[in-house]
Amino acid sequence: MNAIEQLHVLNPGWHDLFEILIVAYLMYRVLLLFHGTRAVQMAVGVVLLFAAYAVAAVLRLGTITYLLGLVFTYGAFALLVVFQPELRAGLAHLGRSRLTRFFQTLDNDFVADALIDAAERLSRARIGAIIALERAVPLGDIVATGSAMQARVSADLLLTIFTPYSPLHDGAVVVRADTIVGAGCILPLSQAELTDRTLGTRHRAALGLSEDTDAVIVVVSEETGSISVAVRGRLRRDLTASQLREALAGRWMRSSEMAAIPSA
């Protein structure tokens, strides 16, 4: 059977094109989930392992092929654990209906106004603060490191929590929807090398949480009073009130909109 006859056998139709478009769109959505996270680096590592396995198979390197085969056999279970945050984020995103998003937006302006007001007042008073806004990935394990709360977000309450020498001022506040669910919480520190020596522990903690989850973290520097936001391992510094509002809008919309905010 020559090439022309093979093309006639394939006989692609409109339904094949439709199916290809669906698969391409699904792959695109999956790539968006991994974009900007550490999962991208891990995925590159997996590809390199597959390439090494192919080379070892071609060169008939039995020991290396056997060992890599074991890695692939049991590595699938490890990947489920490693990519757990991204998988949870993806499933949560699929589970959101348009009606749910509509009702969520009703309180967004109120929460944003409260956070911006608190950040500006904390900045003027040079009071350090760190506020983590939960998105699709639950922050229950972070809340467990501090004191659980159930209080509606307000600027006055945030200022009270971060007042120096108060019991909870050193930790982070966790906000879920329009409710403060935790205070005095401990965040994981980023292991990335920071070239800017002016960044303190709060900024490193904000970056650490943003690397592990899809949370939006607002930081107020105690030394300079500057307002920063960390999202997906990226830190935006010296934000104005309008820029902070854009960053908070990225919490309820796509994180890619954070790219519109200039970094210092």
Image (spheres, rainbow, N blue to C red):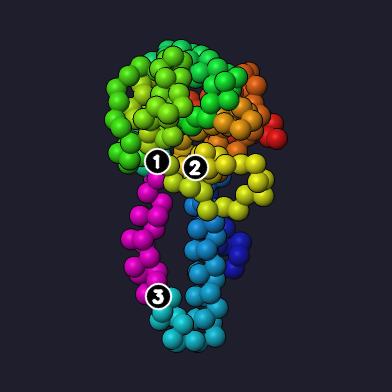
Can you say which quadrant of the picture contains the N terminus? Answer: bottom right
The type of residue carrying mark 2 is Ala
Q: Which mark, by number, is residue 132?
A: none
Most common secondary structure along the magenta stretch: helix
Q: Earlier in the sequence, mark 3 or mark 2?
A: 3
Report the side of 130 relative to 91 (left or right): right
The type of residue carrying mark 1 is Ile
Quickly name the residue at label 3: 69
Q: Nearer the viewer, residue 10 or 176?
A: 176
User: Which quadrant holds residue 153?
Assistant: top left
Helix, strand or loop at label 2? It is helix
Q: Which mark, by number, is residue 186?
A: 1
Helix, strand or loop at label 1? It is loop
Quickly name the residue at label 2: 205
Look at the numbered discs 2 and 1 and tell me whether their residues touch, using CB distance below 8 Å: yes
Picture coordinates of residue 117, whole percent (x, y):
53, 15
Q: Earlier in the sequence, mark 1 or mark 3?
A: 3
Camera-near label (3 vs 2) is 2
Q: Residues within 10 Å of mark 2 (few under 14, many from 20)?
A: many
Real-space CA distance between mark 3 and mark 2, rounded to the nearest whole angstrom:
38 Å
Q: Which residues are magenta?
A: 70-87
Picture coordinates of residue 241, whole percent (x, y):
62, 18
Helix, strand or loop at label 3? It is helix
Q: Is residue 28 visible?
A: no
Report the side of 121 relative to 169 (left or right): right
Q: Residue at x 44, y 14 (%)?
A: 156
